[in-house]
Amino acid sequence: MMNKNFAKYTIFPEIKKGKRYYYAGTTYRVKIDPSNSGKIRGSGKSKVITEKIYLGTASDVLNKLFNAKKSPQKNTFQRIWPAYGYLEAC
């Protein structure tokens, strides 16, 4: 089951055999018995689901970013109100 909310993914490195590889990962909880709901104590057991997606080395990630085919986008401006200030994004 792939979690499609990419805002909750974190990019992290792992070092294997002296080389650094990058992954995107997320963790979340799901109830073992779907009929149980709620977050209070005694509402049923849950298990932790961990998803990890291999991204490659730093050069692989940069190559994928810069060589990706860009789809034509309409130039629209949005106003974003993050917690730390005002931004304008297109």
Image (spheres, helix red, strand yellow):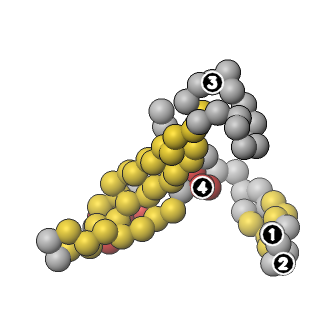
In three-dimensional space, the C-alpha distance between marks 3 and 4, rounded to whole angstroms, equals 23 Å
Amino acid marked by disc 4:
Lys
User: Which is closer to the viewer, label 3 or label 1?
Assistant: 3
Camera-nearest residue between 62 and 9: 9
Amino acid marked by disc 1:
Pro
In three-dimensional space, the C-alpha distance between marks 2 and 4, rounded to whole angstroms, equals 21 Å
Crowd rating for badge 3 (residues with CA inside 10 Å; few <14, some 14–19, many 20+): few
Q: Which residue is mark 1?
A: 82
In three-dimensional space, the C-alpha distance between marks 2 and 3, rounded to whole angstroms, equals 40 Å
| First in sequence: mark 3 vs mark 1 | 3
Residue 28, position in %: x, y?
A: 56, 47
Crowd rating for badge 4 (residues with CA inside 10 Å; few <14, some 14–19, many 20+): few
Camera-nearest residue between 68 and 85: 85
Contact (Cβ within 8 Å) of mark 3 with mark 1: no
Kindly identify the residue that appears in the image at 72 percent across and 57 percent down. 75
Crowd rating for badge 2 (residues with CA inside 10 Å; few <14, some 14–19, many 20+): few
In three-dimensional space, the C-alpha distance between marks 1 and 2, rounded to whole angstroms, equals 6 Å
The local secondary structure at tag 1 comes to: loop
Residue found farthest to the top: 35
Amino acid marked by disc 3:
Pro
Q: Which residue is mark 3?
A: 34
Contact (Cβ within 8 Å) of mark 1 with mark 2: yes
Q: Which residue is mark 2?
A: 85
Camera-nearest residue between 65 and 85: 85
Residue 4 can be seen in this image: no
- 71 over 15 or under it: above or below: above
Q: Which mark is residue 8?
A: 4
Camera-nearest residue between 7 and 32: 32
| First in sequence: mark 2 vs mark 4 | 4
